[in-house]
Amino acid sequence: MSLINSYNPIIVIKNITKTAKNTIFNLSWLDSVYLKILVPAILLVTWESACRLGYLKPLILPSPTAIVQAFERLIKSGELFRHLGISLFRILQGYALGAFFGITLGILIGIFKRIDQGSSVVISFLRPIPIFAWIPVIILWLGIDESTKVTIIALGCFWPILLNVMAGIKHVDKKYLEVARILEKSPYQTLVKVILPSALPSIFTGLRVGIGMAWMCVVAAEVIASTSGIGFLISYSREMLQPDVMFVGVFSIGIVGLIIDRIFKLLEMHFIKWNVNTKRKR
């Protein structure tokens, strides 16, 4: 009976279909590292081929080869590192201010109900206003100066850090606070030993989102009101019809942003070893 079933066309087709699903359609046999390399490689080859065959105009989208050549040229001249260094220094200043005020106010609002109630209307009113709407106002108040760019960056990264710190502190497990009361811990000890460690995942999320916003804000500020920085390089190369240089600036932001995000992930895994989600990221 088993021999008859083995030669049954319907069973044979079912076995073939099952085998195909387990081999062709299931990509688990591919290592994730190879997938991360394969997809960008396919995109680059397709992009380069389209440029060489004339489907893409160089003034609209230069080839990867032209961008790499421009990248090497800007590195040798030192121009790329000069603009990147200026932008990174501005980000460091603005991000430090935004993170300081965001974490401080987030802790106060998350702990004290009166401050939370008193600031809820102001936060709900100011939070939806995009940073680009504040740029003309800040330029009017501070002029075209370094303080303008630092303020724009600080304001841009302030909101995601503030909201994530508030959410992290408000969602601390009540059982932890009850145990702290039973053990007669002081308010300071409860804050340092219970509340902040429990809120660290949300705080790190806010810090990572904030650094992304800082990059967006520095580029916007440098495009509008600056004579240096990576945003200025992108804007100036566009005006001079140098798309290869423009894409070097754009991709440089992505590369540096990727490195910074990776640093934040490593710090998160170091300080929050107990978190299950951070273990899955390893």
Image: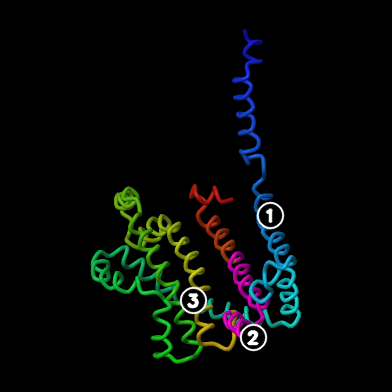
Q: Secondary structure at mark 1?
A: helix
Badge 3 amino acid: Cys
**Mark 2 or 3, closer to the camera:** 2
Residue 217 shows which numbered tag? 3
Badge 2 amino acid: Met
Q: Position of residue 142 (x, y in %)?
A: 43, 90
Do the numbered discs 2 and 3 sit on residues whose CB atoms are within 8 Å? no
Q: Secondary structure at mark 2?
A: loop
Q: Residues within 10 Å of mark 2 (few under 14, many from 20)?
A: few
In the picture, measured across the screen, residue 84 lies left or right of residue 220, that is: right
Residue at 65% in and 37% down: 24
Magenta residue check for 208: no
Relative vertical location of residue 82 with respect to residue 17 in this rendering, above or below:
below
Q: Position of residue 69 (x, y in %)?
A: 75, 74
Which span of residues is magenta-colored?
A: 231-259
Residue 240 shows which numbered tag? 2
Q: Residues within 10 Å of mark 1 (few under 14, many from 20)?
A: few
Predominant SS of the magenta segment:
helix
Whichever of callouts 2 and 1 sits on the residue coming sooner in the sequence is 1
**Mark 3 or 1, closer to the camera:** 1
Q: Position of residue 45 (x, y in %)?
A: 72, 59
Is the N terminus in the top left, top right, bottom left or bottom right quadrant?
top right
Residue matched to label 1? 37
Residue at 66% in and 10% down: 3
Q: CA distance from mark 3 to mark 1?
A: 30 Å
Residue at 65% in and 15% down: 6
